């Protein structure tokens, strides 16, 4: 109310003054009207008559026309200072009333004098600039609002946060982030690879590589074959083999092979960029990790999770905080006591040995199963049962399910602090998945070599087959007539790239199915049994064994990371993989949100794997690196198949770059490039980068030292 | 036009956006939830305050052990009874929002933990803090020995000038190194 009165008073005053100093007021009035703020219409007084409760007294008598340059400068500084104050108001811990008053004061001041500052030639331009800045800030704010409104699944995650706390919710936030990355990868592969070929390339049936071979035609539409990604699914844009090696297709002259290659490289580059940028951002936020120097203080001040809105969760949280306090106090007292160190050491060595045996055993099992499946494939797949056909994928998924439980049991021998035990567990599961994946790849490499041998034979056979075709008709004409043969009848080379793509797609599908089925059985069925059998069971199922399950954050995050690794590995050979993954993540989000709300209980003890948020990001980075290695190896060393895919006929897949440089770019460009790729230039460049890394690392080490020194000084100075 | 009229004015809305870390939708949602706490006739009065008991019925605050302290810290009422006006409520949400800076969060966290409002965290404050965190039932409380040990450890870690209390800058120093603080000190409507 007081504000309203003040405004009315000013308006009256302004109208009064307007009659007096009409000229100057009118020019200022015009300028103001260009600015769209409502308040601009109030400020029509000249500076002398300003009621100075709100303003600094130094600006009392400012009349714009008679200012010297220094005063103009000072005025400009004052205006800038006010602007900065307005921007920093958000971060000040003042009550809203005080902030509002300060904001309105400063805004009026700025408006009043901003117009005054734009004197002389640049006046109109200055006012225009000011107006554009204001519009830009408003646009930015609206855009921020729009962006936050666009974030999907926000309410779902908020609900989970309030029931389960922030560590379970962090898994879903991670899932959502992965979904975003996969959407971009999907956009790249779909828009730049699949759609151009489908729209502008040769249609199905026009070439041998695009047609189902005669021998497979009868079974090409069977559901079993399609589920296995054979038949019509195999000879489509979903896989590498369908793509034509024509250099430019359609009226756009779209460079298909180049696009395929660059998209493959681009997906990896984009993923690296995103992961490293997120890691850098996390590292900045959390600061240098002094993990242990503030243990108790952090437990006190930061352990409560303010997002918890559910009384049951709150009780759990109280219990876990109490336990963690008591444990920490006990640990502090016992940290110098180590009884029976030899027994503990022996048990730990034994446990590690057992784990190594497990890992070696699982690796060998996978290798054995893959070789067996190759034998089955040679016999012909129809002679074997469903299990034998899908053995590899099933075995890998089952190992991924049961071995972690085994590791859990073994780790009870070790008697570590729970956080350290969790780190060991995660490390072991990581090694397990990695070992399995690499064994799978090695077995796949064997298969690739087999197919390449087969290809040589097929090439030889084709020449004889062609010769036989011509022999039949050569008697009629002296010139060889053009023979039209149905593409389905042409003998085909075994396209190893499509085979690799198919294997990955099958692996991902079986992995997904296993996850969902484990979820339904392990969580849902268990919860149903516990709830309903409890009425007629001798002991309390809910409190004792088996009770409701807790949500295993680290296991799920690892599963997600490895799934993404497989996508990165296979995306070059099966452009449909990112699309498949987007679908999978979408379904996972809804399914897991429902499952966690319906079947899980909040965790009793919450231990994060590490202090910083970068632990999982670091694992993702390692997986990204390790999964792009095989793809890069195959691209660089193995020659592509002669009759399928966009690189058929070339010596190596990356020859497409060379070809593009020669034919599509002007001559000088390829010269420049050839100079740039000269080893004489590349080696010094690499050396320079190594030196830069060394320098940066040593400066960061010295900063850390300085930090420690300063801290010590701070403590001894008082 | 008051701040609890049934509709927020556009200018007031844009000023609130300027002065808090909240987006437009969040401010409008806050306005809606705040109005729901008021009775029908109170809704048209400007600048009404909602009593602490009614604020504490919000599900986001109901289970929080520091709920009363939060209300006291953000309340600007003259009677010091913890009642919040709509602007106080916005201040609360802004400090607890996702985009708030570490400085503002640590400032308000300090004031929340300062049970006796004397500007420092002394042993009495720390003891009350621990009791809040371990729940109200007897079997979850710490024994006096454990409490004493805990408080000693905390003061040893955070009290740099060794005066037996933790002041604001020491508190901010400790908090700035914690990786969990910003993500756990959050309330979202």
Image (tube, rainbow, N blue to C red):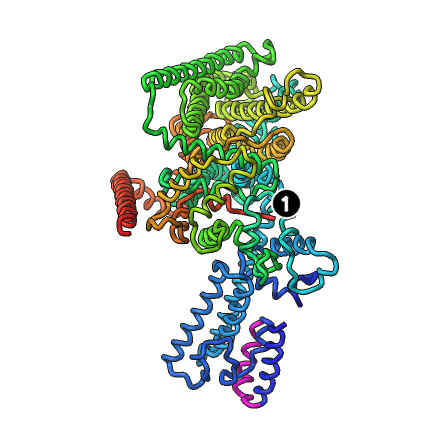
Magenta segment: A20-36
Q: Which SS class for mark 1?
A: helix
Q: Nearer the viewer, residue A40 or A100?
A: A100
Residue A34 at what x, y percent from top left?
A: 56, 74
Residue drawn at x 52%, y 16% is A395
Q: Which residue position holds label 1?
A: B59
Q: Main secondary structure of the magenta part?
A: helix
Does any portion of residue A578 appear in the rendered image?
no
Q: Nearer the viewer, residue A705 or A342?
A: A342
Residue B2 at what x, y percent from top left?
A: 66, 66
Is residue B115 shown above or below A369? below
Residue drawn at x 65%, y 55% is B34
Quadrant hosting residue A532: top right
Q: Name the quarter where the N terminus of chain A is drawn.
A: bottom right
Q: Nearer the viewer, residue A560 or A412?
A: A412
Residue A188 at what x, y percent from top left?
A: 52, 40
Q: Is residue A24 magenta?
A: yes
Whether residue B4 sits left or right of residue A263 in the image: it is: right
Chain letter of disc 1 in the image: B
Q: Is residue A389 magenta?
A: no
């Amino acid at each position: 109310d007081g504000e309203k009165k003040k405004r009315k008073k000013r308006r009256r005053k302004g109208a009064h003054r307007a009659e007096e100093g009409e000229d100057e007021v009118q020019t200022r009035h015009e300028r103001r009207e260009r600015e769209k703020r409502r308040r601009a219409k109030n400020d029509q007084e000249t500076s002398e008559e300003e009621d100075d409760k709100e303003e600094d007294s130094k600006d009392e008598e400012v009349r714009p026309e008679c200012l010297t340059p220094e005063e103009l400068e000072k005025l400009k500084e004052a205006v800038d200072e006010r602007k900065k104050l307005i921007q920093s108001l958000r971060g000040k811990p003042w009550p809203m009333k005080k902030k509002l008053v300060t904001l309105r004061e400063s805004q009026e001041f700025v408006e009043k004098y901003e117009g005054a500052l734009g004197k002389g030639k640049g006046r109109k331009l200055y006012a225009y600039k000011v107006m554009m800045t204001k519009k830009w800030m408003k646009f930015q704010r609206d855009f921020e609002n729009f962006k936050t409104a666009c974030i999907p699944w926000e309410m779902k995650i908020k609900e989970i946060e309030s029931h389960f706390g922030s560590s379970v919710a962090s898994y879903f936030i991670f899932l959502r982030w992965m979904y975003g990355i996969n959407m971009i990868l999907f956009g790249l592969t779909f828009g730049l690879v699949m759609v151009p070929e489908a729209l502008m390339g040769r249609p199905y049936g026009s070439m041998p590589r695009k047609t189902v071979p005669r021998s497979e035609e009868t079974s090409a539409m069977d559901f079993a074959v399609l589920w296995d990604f054979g038949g019509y699914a195999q000879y489509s844009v979903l896989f590498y083999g369908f793509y034509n090696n024509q250099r430019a297709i359609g009226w756009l002259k779209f460079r298909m092979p180049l696009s395929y290659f660059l998209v493959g490289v681009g997906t990896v580059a984009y993923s690296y960029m995103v992961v490293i940028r997120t890691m850098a951002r996390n590292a900045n936020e959390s600061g240098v990790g002094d993990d242990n120097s503030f243990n108790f203080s952090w437990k006190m001040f930061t352990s409560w999770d303010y997002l918890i809105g559910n009384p049951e969760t709150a009780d759990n949280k109280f219990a876990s905080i109490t336990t963690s306090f008591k444990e920490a106090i006990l640990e502090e007292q016992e940290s110098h006591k180590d009884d029976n160190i030899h027994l503990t050491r022996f048990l730990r060595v034994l446990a590690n040995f057992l784990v190594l045996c497990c890992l070696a055993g699982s690796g060998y099992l996978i290798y054995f199963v893959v070789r067996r499946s190759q034998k089955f494939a040679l016999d012909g797949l129809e002679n074997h049962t469903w299990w034998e056909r899908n053995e590899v994928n099933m075995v890998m998924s089952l190992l991924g399910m049961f071995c972690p439980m085994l590791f859990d049991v073994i780790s009870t021998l070790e008697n570590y602090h729970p956080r350290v035990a969790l780190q060991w567990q995660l490390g072991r599961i990581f090694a397990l998945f990695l070992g399995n994946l690499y064994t799978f790849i090695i077995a796949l490499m064997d298969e690739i070599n087999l197919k390449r041998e087969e290809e040589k034979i097929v090439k030889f056979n084709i020449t004889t087959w062609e010769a036989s075709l011509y022999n039949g008709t050569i008697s009629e004409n002296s010139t060889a007539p053009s023979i039209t043969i149905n593409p389905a009848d042409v003998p085909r080379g075994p396209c190893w790239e499509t085979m690799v793509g198919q294997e990955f797609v099958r692996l991902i599908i079986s992995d997904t199915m296993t996850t969902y089925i484990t979820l339904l059985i392990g969580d849902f069925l268990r919860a149903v049994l516990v709830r309903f059998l409890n009425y007629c069971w001798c002991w309390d199922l809910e409190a004792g064994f088996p009770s409701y399950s807790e949500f295993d954050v680290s296991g799920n995050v690892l599963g997600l990371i490895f799934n993404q690794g497989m996508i990165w590995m296979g995306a070059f050979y099966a452009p449909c993989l990112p699309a498949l993954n987007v679908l999978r993540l979408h379904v996972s989000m809804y399914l897991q949100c429902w499952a966690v709300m319906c079947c899980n209980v909040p965790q009793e003890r919450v231990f994060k794997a590490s202090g910083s948020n970068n632990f999982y990001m670091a694992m993702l980075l390692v997986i990204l690196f390790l999964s792009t290695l095989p793809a890069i190896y195959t691209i660089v060393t193995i020659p592509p198949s002669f009759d399928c895919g966009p690189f058929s006929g070339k010596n190596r897949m990356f020859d497409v770059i060379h070809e593009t440089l020669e034919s599509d770019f002007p001559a000088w460009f390829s010269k420049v490039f050839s100079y740039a790729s000269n080893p004489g230039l590349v080696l010094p460049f690499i050396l320079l980068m190594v030196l830069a890394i060394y320098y940066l690392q040593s400066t960061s080490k010295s900063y850390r030292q300085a930090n420690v020194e300063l801290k010590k000084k701070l403590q001894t100075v008082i | 036009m008051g701040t609890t009229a049934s509709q927020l004015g556009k200018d007031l809305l844009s000023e609130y956006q300027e002065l808090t870390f909240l987006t437009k939708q969040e401010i409008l949602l806050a306005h809606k939830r705040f109005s729901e706490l008021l009775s029908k006739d109170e809704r048209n009065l400007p600048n009404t305050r909602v009593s602490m008991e009614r604020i504490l019925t919000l599900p986001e605050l109901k289970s929080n052990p520091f709920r009363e302290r939060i209300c006291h810290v953000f309340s600007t009422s003259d009677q010091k009874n913890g009642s919040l006006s709509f602007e106080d409520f916005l201040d609360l949400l802004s400090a607890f929002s996702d985009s708030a800076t570490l400085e503002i969060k640590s400032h308000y966290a300090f004031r929340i933990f300062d049970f006796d409002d004397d500007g420092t965290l002394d042993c009495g404050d720390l003891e009350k803090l621990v009791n809040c965190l371990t729940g109200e039932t007897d079997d979850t409380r710490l024994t006096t020995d454990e409490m004493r040990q805990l408080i000693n450890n905390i003061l040893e870690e955070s009290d740099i000038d060794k005066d037996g209390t933790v002041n604001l800058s020491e508190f901010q120093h400790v908090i700035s190194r914690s990786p969990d603080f910003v993500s756990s000190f959050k309330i979202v409507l």
